Image (cartoon, grey):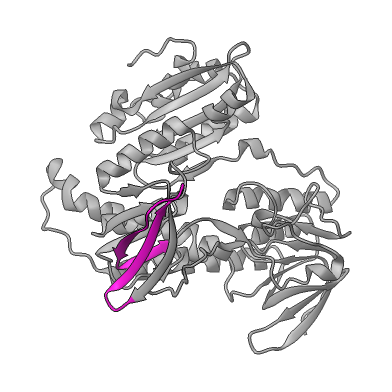
Amino acid sequence: MADTNFDVVIIGGGPGGYNAAVRAGQLGLKAAIVESRGVLGGTCLNVGCMPSKALLHASELFEAASGEFAHIGIEVPAPKLNLIQMMKAKQDSVNALTKGVEFLMKKNKVTYFVGFGKIEGAGKVSVTAADGKVEQLTTKHIVIATGSEPTPLPGVTVDQKQIVDSTGALSLPAVPKHLVVVGAGIIGLELGSVWRRLGAKVTVVEFLDRITPGMDTEVATQFQKILTKQGFAFKLGTKVTSAKTGKSGVSLTLEAAAGGNAETLEADVVLVAIGRRPFTAGLGLDTVGITPDQRGFIATDHFKTSAPGVWAIGDVIHGPMLAHKAEEDAVAVIELIAGKAGHVDYDLVPSVVYTFPEVAWVGKTEDQLKAAGVQYKTGKFPFMANSRAKINHETDGFVKFLADAKTDKVYGVHILGPQAGEMIGEACVLMAFGGASEDLARTCHPHPTRSEAVKQAAMGVEGWTMQA
């Protein structure tokens, strides 16, 4: 019989949960983690970040072999898609990652319970296994790290065959002739990119009059132009009112968001990607007096809920619904439980869209600075003028710095271009130390690299860009 008394029990085995467990083990806390999926890693490792990146990488190579190879003098036969093998390679990578997380639990002496975790009152958690067997755990602290699930669309029923959510879109058995993506956010555009590269016609339907809400408007506008050039079609300011499935596919009924005549759009597959919502159903929150808000989020104060000894992190609390944000929450909450000074600066959580080119940003957008009446300066640099991007035929996009007009303190950095997700890290470090654009502008960068575009944009804040 496994020991059932702990210092901390973590419900949920995703990036928030398993990193909390690792940190608890490192700090000498007796920890348990409860996960119903049967494998650790949560949505991110199993049906989110990791498998989508595997397919993005594979589809990018397929598209390159279909056209770009010949342009740079690499002559190969026309590539043939083996979707079964592509999906197997994706799953093999996922399996290796989830096994790695299990190893981390053993390494840090964390007890792993497979089953659905439910709070049964103060300091009590039940674990119900797939066969119905229930174990009762007692603990000083409970950490809720149950993540999120796809938000459903009224009038549209997901069957994971013809109408899919992000999970289903990662495992389609064939390339659809016409994929309609409902929602022009990060998830929809990434998965739309995968299937477009593999041969699908992709139409994106978005209720708002722009794509990627939350992204700097200037960046989003240019990003949409690039995606359109790649073959995406956009129907903005449009809502989906119903969907009917049949042998020939899916018939969507659309209306203008502002009202108007209905139109019909036919598709082989429809991907519903209108966002995610916290997963808090059935967790027994009521047994400790916790009531989520109307959107399902749990209110917290430095991760403390309204119930003593019960904490919450990641997608179930307010803030960016991102795996790396959950990881920061995880470290902070355990350090607070251990009596240390855990803290997360949510103004410095970067966002990345893993399309090609990528989009990455940290800090304030230009829209936010204008709305707040902040006086700021801008520095921009196009990848068209970056030597490494030019020789690699990756010239779409630009880097933009936003800095205080008087102090030069950097408020935000926005990158639309190749490897943007890798390059945003230096902006995060700069801003974490309260740095000025000049600090980065006068830091030597290796040549030739794409990162020189970041330096040149920083130089542009004071008007001394030298390569454009």
Counting from the top left corner in percent of width and height, residue 18 is at 65, 61
In the picture provided, is 219 more to the left or to the right than 315?
Answer: left
Q: Quadrant of the C terminus?
A: top left
Front-most of residues 75 and 333: 333
In the picture provided, is 81 more to the left or to the right than 315?
Answer: left
Q: Which residues are magenta?
A: 246-271
The quarter of the picture where residue 382 lies is: top left
Counting from the top left corner in percent of width and height, residue 271 is at 40, 63
Q: Quadrant of the N terminus?
A: bottom right
Q: Residue at x 25, y 48 (%)?
A: 231
In the rendered image, the residue lying farthest to the front is 261
Is residue 159 visible in the rendered structure shown here?
A: yes
Relative height, residue 435 to residue 326 (above, below): above
Q: Residue at x 62, y 20 (%)?
A: 373
Relative height, residue 166 to residue 368 (above, below): below
In the picture provided, is 239 more to the left or to the right than 367?
Answer: left
Front-most of residues 352 and 439: 352
Q: Residue at x 47, y 38 (%)?
A: 360
